[in-house]
Image (cartoon, helix red, strand yellow):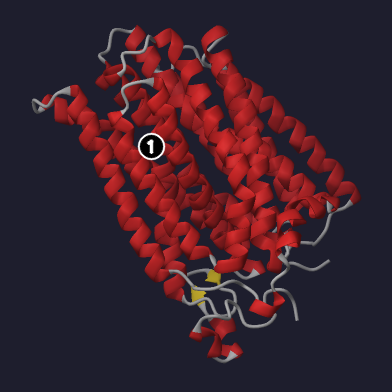
Amino acid sequence: MNAWTAPNYFHESQDSMLPMSSQEQRRLGPVQLSPNILPRHGLTFLFSAFFSIGLVTFVSIGQAYILNENLKIPVSEQGTISGNLVFWTEIVTLLFFVPAGVLMDRIGRKQVFSAGFLLLALAYALYPTASSIGELTLFRIIYALGIVAVTGALSTIMVDYPAERSRGKLIAITGFLNGLGIVVLNQFFGALPQRLTAGGMSGTDAGLYTHFGIAGIALISAVVVSVGLKSGTPVKKEERPPLKKLLTSGISYMKNPRILLSYGAAFVARGDQSIIGTFLPLWGTTAGIAMGMDPAEAVKKGTLIFIISQAAALLWAPVIGPVIDRMNRVSALVLCMFLASAGYLSLGFVGNPHEPFSLFFFMLLGIGQISSFLGAQSLIGQEAPKAERGSVIGMFNISGAIGILIITSTGGRLFDGMSPKAPFLVVGAINLLVMLAGILVRIHAPGKAAGGEE
């Protein structure tokens, strides 16, 4: 009996009383589900996958608007300020990812997930009321706590719900819905201030109501996940590891070279997402303002560049997911990191981001970004032990937070002092290094073959 058919999943629920044979046959479309996971749990997870990352990434678009419209920050200072805000965000995530993972292993996933959406709702409701960078930083910290809970729970449930043979498919579907949510939410709300101001509303009020709309969606999401996700944890109460072990398991499992590699992949994959979310809209916005656009139009144009990259990621996820399922997970990660490095380094050919010629490279960027995310998640999903999954994935997320912390704080200074594309080129080089590390692990500690056999 393997880890996916071992004793009844999420034992606190009455669903665990169903016969194991029926549990094993449950599917959600092409995805084979783990024992005791019902299709309605899977559908609720897919709902959360659509809204969660879209809600998380909107902060960069809304922030660009607030820096220009509300706080009147000079364009020359916005890269450093944005990098600093991300820096303080990641300090919070570093402190709380492991405690959040421990909570998920002790009390369950959905309570933490729901709390995360509530924190995002509060942060977005407060964000447009900031009258200084200090207040903006405080509200960003509340947002950071929401990120910890939402992304930590999303990553853990994404590993919990599929059977091993379908892991790549669910991760790809999740990536597709993440990208779709990013495109839909950011396109609609990114363009909303301009629509409102065109209708006669002041720029400040337009930003306020836009953020209130985002906060409302986060509130609804909190209710949906609290009702629809599976209760409990993957193991019986008596099988749960002691609290001390949970707090240290993320570090102790680093002796597994594939888990260590996945931490390295998380470092750059999360940095990938943050660089795109933070600096791509900002690049488009500042370039637009330099061309003479007003702030609302420039934000809309900057958002469009971001949306194009995410649309490419959206279309690529269903292609790369089944490929990952057919490959050794380490080999798949090497392929994904190659695609990521190619996407980021290709931005060296971009001059003006608003030129039609540049769109092709932003598409490559999106393909690379989603590939690194899916490759890293697939590897940690295979290797993280069931009883300590939340804690190990918490350390995986901490590695990602460190990546965001270093890459974005450095990236902000490179953005202002060297070139808007400099942060992307640095990330491309880091992806190459992780790819080389993956080749070494593949040679010396390849792990399971495609399909899950050693």
Q: Quadrant of residue 143?
A: top left
Residue 102 x, y percent position in the rendering: 63, 59
Identify residue type, mark 1: Phe
As drawn, which residue projects farthest toward the right?
Answer: 444
Identify the element where label 1 is drawn.
Answer: helix
Residue at numbered disc 1:
58
Horizontal arrangement in the rendering, residue 28 relative to residue 410 (left or right): left
Q: Is residue 355 left or right of residue 166?
A: left
The one nearer the camera, 196 or 313, is 196
Of residue 63 and residue 307, the one placed in the foreground of this image is 63
In the rendered view, tell whether residue 185 sits above or below residue 116: above
Residue 330, image x, y percentages: 76, 50
Q: Residue at x 38, y 37 (%)?
A: 58
Answer above or below: position of 166 versus 299: below
Left or right, residue 407 beside residue 145? right
Identify the residue shown where x is 84% and y is 48%: 442
Q: Residue at x 71, y 46 (%)?
A: 333
